[in-house]
Image: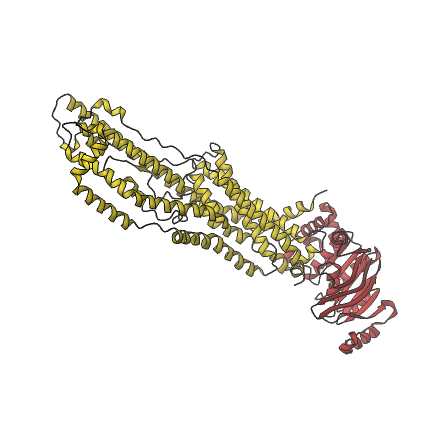
């Protein structure tokens, strides 16, 4: 004997096909997912291409450097200016750089995250502006959290609108047509009928979406099997978010108002949860933990620089006192020695301002992390950034690695400069290389997935309670 | 069997139904007459458990409808004034769907036969309901009542707006149901139809059942006179 639910599912499906909803969903979702994935792929390909191009430039320059070193070491006169001579350690440290790249994660296509405001490769040199300054443009980790037309934009912003269009009248239509009374005269609870109907629509939309995501992402070169845990988390988050909007639509329908009224309410919720809450969180993060201005940092740097230049001789003496291993050599350039000596002072003087930046950024991020539970949209965005490897945490991790590498790079050449040594061809293979280390796994996405399902459960409970209250208004008006 | 005992429904200070006592036995067709707002639909909504009584009891086969909603709905079939069905489904698909909701499974052939018996034109059985007239939809309602083997039929002005031929066909179907032992409670404005099909007639005014007569004990002119006299009664009578 067939169950009541099988009748509801079957005829709901037939109705949706005849109303051309199914065809519309397939068409609109295909267009949106395809466009978003192609956008994401283009961005990731560009990133890979930029890194590869930088590495090719380095390889090309290295081969020229080797030829020059060969000639110099063979006693030939080379026709290049003094500041291009690779046998000078300061030239090597400044011109023959290594690429410190952050390659895109396997699932970087999903969310642009912070990738459109950060660089993915740098070539740290042994002097010049402090590397940290490249990152001070960032004033708020959520400032550009929402923006690109990527898959996360489609899933977080547009998918709820499709759910709203698909289900704003999931109960009110029958009520307005007078069918609900006929249904309610049968031995079936209106709430359970509504849930079954919503479940059918949810499964239909989920099925289409998951199939499209699997096909289009695979087509775009994302191996969903390779990082199965991330793929699974991504799927659960998306399906949980979808479920949240379906349950919200049911809840709004249970109020017993007209379809038009339901649509207005649901759009209101969408504006609140997807637009207002994230932007308010952004504003509040800025207000609660304001980041010092970049102008202040640059001024401070200039003052310290000027002060350091004035006292270069004195500073060099202090520096050599602190680094006796570099003292007592003849032949080194005093100018360069003074320069590096002043850099330590500059770094130590500017450090409090940089620290303040970092502290404020961390405070902002911590605050955003704590408050993300007030909106499923925030939960999803932070998770998608995490899964894509484009979160603030990923870039901060990369920045630290680059900072450390820049110190290693400088320290590799510094003794040679102080000792007045020449750089030789044999030293080329011994140059420090940057190897990007992925940050340790962070359970934020799993926590967020649970949080999204808790949202759904709470709404479901509210719906059950509400349905008991609203029976009369649903059936007798 | 349908039974109302001191059934009362109040909305704040307004009394929609006042201490109704009513009994509809198997094979009875009880027609409730009355003006708009007399309490006819409220009575039917109470039996359907769409609303809960303020006082009193509504039972179907001795089961309190508020406590045994699922069981009592298993026994009844309801046809409102304008039976609305899913416009994108055919008559047969609608019948299959609602039978399924009522826990009844039929083959396609059985459903076709039920629709034919209810008088629906054969070439409309597989057409979408959006192309149906009101009378055709009411026939699907009767087919549904037959299919569900309902022992109680609740009708809320089912012939309102039907042309005389369709109305007559509907009455014949009701009489068929009566012969099968179905207890029918029908709210109507149509005195002629009440006299022609009903076994019992009640006249309601302002939530009170003023008169209750057996249909064969009164002629149509007498019924009309009784109805009009009841409508003329001052409001204080009912209170």
Residue farthest to the top? Answer: A74
Residue sitting at 74 percent across and 70 percent down?
B38
* Location of residue B221 by image quarter: bottom right
Q: Of residues A303 and A86, which is closer to you in this image? A: A303
Picture coordinates of residue B162 (x, y %)?
Answer: 71, 65
**Residue A189 appears left or right of A275:** right
Total marks in image: 0
**Residue A311 appears left or right of A196:** left
Q: Is residue A390 visible?
A: no
* Location of residue B55 by image quarter: bottom right
Q: Is residue A320 above or below residue A195?
A: above
Check the image and tell me how it is coloured: by chain
Q: Of residues A94 and A370, which is closer to you in this image? A: A370
* Location of residue B5 by image quarter: bottom right
Q: Is residue A456 above or below residue A83?
A: below
Picture coordinates of residue A78 (x, y %)?
Answer: 13, 27
Residue farthest to the left? Answer: A77
* Chain coloured yellow: A
Q: Quarter of the image for the N terminus of chain A: give it.
A: top right
Q: Of residues A121 and A89, which is closer to you in this image? A: A89
Picture coordinates of residue A133 (x, y %)?
Answer: 29, 43
Picture coordinates of residue A116 (x, y %)?
Answer: 36, 44
Residue farthest to the right? Answer: B217
Q: Quarter of the image for the C terminus of chain A: give it.
A: bottom right
**Residue A456 appears left or right of B216:** left
Q: Is residue A308 visible?
A: yes
Q: Of residues A178 and B20, which is closer to you in this image? A: B20
* Chain coloured red: B
């Amino acid at each position: 004997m067939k169950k009541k639910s099988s009748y509801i599912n079957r005829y709901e499906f037939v109705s949706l096909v005849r109303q051309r909803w199914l065809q519309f969903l397939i068409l609109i979702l295909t267009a949106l997912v395809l466009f978003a994935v192609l956008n994401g792929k283009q961005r990731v390909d560009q990133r890979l291409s930029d890194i590869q191009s930088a590495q090719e430039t380095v390889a090309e320059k290295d081969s020229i450097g080797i030829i020059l070193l060969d000639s110099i070491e063979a006693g030939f006169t080379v026709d290049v200016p003094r500041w291009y001579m690779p046998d000078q350690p300061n030239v090597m440290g400044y011109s023959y750089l290594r690429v410190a790249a952050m390659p895109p994660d396997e699932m970087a296509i999903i969310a642009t995250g912070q990738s459109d405001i950060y660089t993915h490769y740098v070539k740290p040199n042994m002097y010049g502006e402090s590397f940290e300054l490249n990152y001070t443009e960032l004033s708020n980790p959520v400032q550009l959290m929402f923006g690109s037309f990527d898959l996360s934009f489609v899933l977080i912003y547009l998918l709820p609108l499709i759910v709203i269009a698909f289900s704003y009248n999931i109960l009110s239509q029958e009520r307005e047509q007078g069918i609900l009374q006929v249904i309610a005269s049968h031995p079936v609870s209106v709430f359970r009928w509504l849930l079954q109907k919503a479940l059918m629509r949810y499964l239909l939309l989920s099925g289409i979406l998951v199939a499209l995501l699997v096909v289009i992402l695979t087509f775009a070169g994302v191996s969903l099997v390779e990082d199965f845990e991330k793929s699974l988390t991504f799927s659960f988050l998306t399906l949980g978010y979808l479920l949240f909007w379906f349950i919200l639509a049911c809840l709004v329908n249970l109020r017993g108002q007209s379809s038009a009224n339901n649509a207005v309410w649901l759009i209101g919720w969408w504006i609140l949860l997807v637009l207002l809450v994230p932007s308010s969180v952004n504003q509040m993060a800025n207000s609660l933990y304001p980041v010092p201005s970049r102008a202040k940092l640059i001024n401070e740097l200039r003052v310290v620089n000027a002060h350091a230049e004035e006292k270069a001789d004195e500073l060099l003496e202090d520096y050599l006192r602190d680094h006796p291993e570099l003292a007592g050599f003849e032949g080194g350039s005093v100018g360069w020695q003074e320069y590096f000596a002043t850099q330590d002072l500059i770094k130590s003087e500017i450090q409090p301002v940089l620290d303040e930046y970092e502290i404020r950024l961390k405070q902002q991020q911590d605050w955003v992390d704590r408050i993300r539970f007030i909106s499923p949209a925030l939960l999803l965005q932070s998770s998608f950034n995490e899964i894509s490897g484009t979160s603030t945490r990923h870039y901060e991790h990369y920045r630290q690695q680059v900072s450390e590498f820049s110190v290693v790079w400088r320290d590799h050449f510094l003794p040679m400069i102080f000792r007045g040594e020449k750089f030789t061809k044999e030293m080329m293979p011994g140059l420090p290389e940057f190897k990007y280390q992925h940050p340790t796994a962070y359970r934020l996405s799993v926590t967020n997935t649970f949080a999204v399902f808790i949202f759904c459960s709470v709404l479901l409970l509210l719906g059950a309670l509400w349905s008991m209250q609203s029976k009369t208004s649903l059936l007798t008006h | 069997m349908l039974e109302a005992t001191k059934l009362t429904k109040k909305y704040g200070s307004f009394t929609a139904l006042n201490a109704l006592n009513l009994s509809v036995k198997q094979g009875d067709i009880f027609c409730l007459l009355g003006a708009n707002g007399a309490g006819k639909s409220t009575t039917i909504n109470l039996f359907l458990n769409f609303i809960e009584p303020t006082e009193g009891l509504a039972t179907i086969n001795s089961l309190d409808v508020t406590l045994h909603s699922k069981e009592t709905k298993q026994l009844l079939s309801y046809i409102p004034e304008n039976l609305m069905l899913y416009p994108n489904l055919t008559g047969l698909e609608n019948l299959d769907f609602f039978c399924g909701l009522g826990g009844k499974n039929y083959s396609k052939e059985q459903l076709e036969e039920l629709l034919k018996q209810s008088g629906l034109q054969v070439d409309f059985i597989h057409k979408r309901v959006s192309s149906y007239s009101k009378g055709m939809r009411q026939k699907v309602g009767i087919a549904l009542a037959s299919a569900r083997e309902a022992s109680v039929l609740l009708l809320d002005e089912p012939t309102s707006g039907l042309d005389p031929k369709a109305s007559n066909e509907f009455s014949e179907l009701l009489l068929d149901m009566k012969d099968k032992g179905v207890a029918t409670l029908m709210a109507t404005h149509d005195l002629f139809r009440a006299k022609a099909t009903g076994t019992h007639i009640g006249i309601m005014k302002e939530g009170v059942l003023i008169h209750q007569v057996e249909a064969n004990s009164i002629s149509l002119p007498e019924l009309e006179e009784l109805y009009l006299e009841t409508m003329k009664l001052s409001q204080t009578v009912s209170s």
